[in-house]
Image (tube, rainbow, N blue to C red):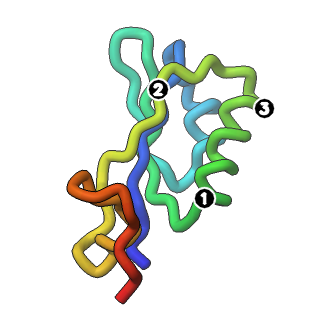
Amino acid sequence: MTQLVYELSFKGAASETLAEAFEGCCVRTDHGITIVRSEVPDQAALQGLLNRVHALGLELLDLRLVAEPDEADAWAIPSTESSEFPEPQ
């Protein structure tokens, strides 16, 4: 399965030490907001990122999916044309 890419943003400018807490992630700061971008293989890994934000006492502002699954994973995304999920291929 394709890894998804998520961005988490939180209040404050991340210091180098704080950025190191997100090893393996891209971390940038802009206008007092820190954005962490990470490839996430599954929901457990996403929850781990969220737990890290919480454990560090950071105020989460936004979480968004920035890269969706490819066509082979399209069955995992509900269609807007139907209320039913298509069968996996």
| Tags 3 and 2 touching, CB below 8 Å | no
Mark 2 and mark 1: span between their CA atoms?
A: 17 Å
Residue position marked by numbered label 2 in the rendering: 62
Residue position marked by numbered label 1 in the rendering: 43
Residue at 52% x, 67% y is: 41
Disc nearer the start of the sequence (2/1): 1
Q: Is residue 13 above or below residue 71?
A: above
Residue position marked by numbered label 3 in the rendering: 55
Disc nearer the start of the sequence (1/3): 1
Mark 1 and mark 3: span between their CA atoms?
A: 18 Å
Q: Residue 70: name its quadrant.
A: bottom left
Q: Considering depth in this image, is 21 or 42 the residue closer to the camera? A: 42
Q: Amino acid at mark 3?
A: Ala
Which mark is nearer the camera, 3 or 2?
Answer: 2
Q: Is residue 9 above or below residue 49?
A: above
Residue at 40% x, 38% y is: 64
Q: Considering depth in this image, is 19 or 61 the residue closer to the camera? A: 61
Residue at 49% x, 17% y is: 13
